[in-house]
Structures are given as C-alpha cells and as structure tokens.
Amino acid sequence: MDSIRVFAPATVANVACGFDIFGFAVDNPGDEIVLTTSDEPGVRIVDITGDGGRLPREAARNTAGIAIQTYLHHINRNDVGLDIVLHKKMPLGSGLGSSAASSVAGVFAINELLGRPLPVIKLLPFAMEGERIACGSAHADNVGPSLLGGFVVVRSYSPLDVIKIETPATLFCTLVHPDIEVNTKDARFILKNEVSLKNTIIQMGNVAGLIAGLMTPDYSLISRSLVDVIIEPVRAILIPEFNEAKQAALDNGALGCSISGSGPSMFALSRDAQTAEKIGAAMQQAFLSVGITSEAYVSEINRQGPKVMPN
C-alpha cells in the first residue's frame, strides 16, 4: 500500500460539567487526510483544502504533520518519505476539535500505512503533540475521543490515563456552529484560577451523575447532570445569544445543552434523530434572530473513531 485516505471525527470536549476531562466523538463533521509514500525521505504537506489558506504548510508547524513526524521518530522510521493532502471539512476555531481531528487522522493513517506497528491507544501521545502545536497545550479531551471513538474520560495526565466508557445505544448529538470566532487562548484566559467549594461540590456531583447516567443508561440522570456551574457561566458571554439558543434546545426536547469545547459551537444531546434535527433548527433560528448565520450537524455518537476511506 503506497497511499491511504483516513477520516477522523470531530469531537465535543468538556461536555458541560467535565471541563478538560470529558469528550465524545461524532459521526459528522470530520477531517480527511491522504498520505502517499515518496522516495524522498521526510514529511511534506503538498496541499490543504477547506482552510482558506490559514493553516501552515510546514509539516513541523501543522497539527497533522507534527503528529506524523513525532510518530516516525518514535518508531525509528525517519527514512520514510510522505506527501500529505489534508481536507479540512469543519470550521477552524469552532470548538469541534478541528486540530485534533487532523492530528488523529494523520497519526492513524501513518500507523495503518506502515502495517500497524503500534496499537491504537499508543498513538494518543503523538496526536496530543498536534494539540500542543495548535494551542500550546497537549490536552487529550479532543484527540482521545477522536482516536478511540465514543465517550472518553481523561482521568490523569501524569501518568496519562484515558478511559472509554459505554454510552446509550440511542443518543444523538446536535452541533450548531454560529458564524463567529472565539479564540481558544482567549476562552481559557478569562477563566478563574479558583472556584468556590460550593460550586466544586455541585460540579463533582454532576460529573459523577453524567458518567452513571451514560453507563446505566438513565436519560433523566443524564439530563440532570448536563449542568456546568463553573466554566459555562464565564464563557457564555463570548457567544452572542447563547442563553436563547440553549433555551431553544431545551424547549425542543434536548436532554441538555452547553458549549462545545471553548466555543463558539454549542452541542445538545437527545434521544432520537427527529428531536435532534428539531433542536438544531430551533437553535439556528435563535442565532438568526440577531443576524448570526450558523451551520448545524446531527449525528449519533461515533463509536469507531478514525476509519480508512476508499482512495
């Protein structure tokens, strides 16, 4: 095999109460990467589509490129020559794990192309290097679910401990991306360094409740637990019409609704596709009422993670 095309899914990080420790993958949207072997050693990005020329073409400064380079160095295969074509199929800076999808697609693709020398779980640190390039922090709440699929808990970084948990068979996600931009570094900068004991206790209860609700499954418990009393109240001010869009989701049957990652995208969970579509339309209308256009995506939880596509 001298060429491979791989899709890696978008992700929702934080999932309301689980700041920096929860994330899940969705079927739509996602990124695609095409790797082709070359006789000339080294990793080269030959084209990127869908980014409007915003992403770096130098491999060492690109999330997919650095993930692949780090992987090749680890397995002592710096002799490998690769040409990369990256297809960005989601908005940049959207809170949908765009940089994570690219790095996961890249490292999964090279591992497949070389005959799977490493198990999938061992690819996580290389994908995290892509996140370090993108935002300065090698966090796993996006790359974890994008790589492993499903709902992921990042229990610890020292040592790295990532757990995939079971989710209900019928759980749908609505994603709405308003056409505004929220800088990830800005969204982190405005957060407080300390929180009250009262809010910590509430948040811990919701974290435990959400995990129990997903694994039981208990939709009522999931709904009661999708509450963030620490991060959402601060970051909501960065998203115009946030409260109205959230209320529209809840009024139309959402189990819960919050910010996806650092925003500006919002997510809502529901029990069936019809409700999920209805929620998306209502949230889009809320944004449109103040002149903000948006994109909406509806899908089940992606349980597979990345997959090889026909070339």
Image (tube, helix red, strand yellow):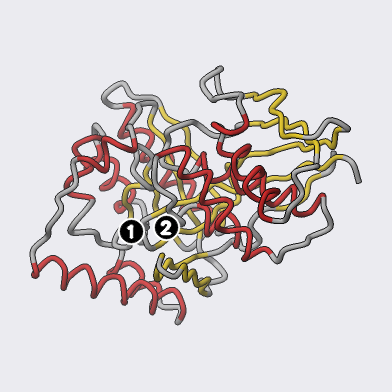
Q: CA distance from mark 1 to mark 2?
A: 6 Å
Dividing the picture into quadrants, the one containing residue 57 is top right
Residue located beneath label 1 in the image = 256
Given residues 48 and 59, the one toward you in this image is 59
What amino acid type should be assigned to the residue bearing mark 1? Gly
Locate residue 79 relative to residue 269 in the image: left or right.
right
Locate residue 264 relative to residue 3 in the image: left or right.
left
Residue located beneath label 2 in the image = 269
Q: Badge 2: few (under 14), some or many (20 or more) residues near its Cα, within 10 Å?
A: many
Given residues 56 and 51, the one toward you in this image is 56
- Residue 186 in the image: x percent, y percent? 26, 35
Q: What residue appears at the point 38 percent right and 79 percent down from the top-left corner?
A: 212
Question: Which disc number belongs to residue 126?
Answer: none
Count of numbered circles in the view: 2
Q: Badge 1: few (under 14), some or many (20 or more) residues near its Cα, within 10 Å?
A: many
Q: What residue appears at the point 30 percent right and 53 percent down from the top-left corner?
A: 250
For residue 180, above or below residue 221: above
* Dots 1, 2 in contact, CB < 8 A: yes
Locate residue 60 relative to residue 118 in the image: left or right.
left
Q: What residue appears at the point 79 percent right and 45 percent down from the top-left corner?
A: 309
For residue 279, above or below residue 36: below
What amino acid type should be assigned to the residue bearing mark 2? Leu
Locate residue 46 relative to residue 213 in the image: left or right.
right
Q: Quadrant of the C terminus?
A: top right
- Residue 164 in the image: x percent, y percent? 53, 71
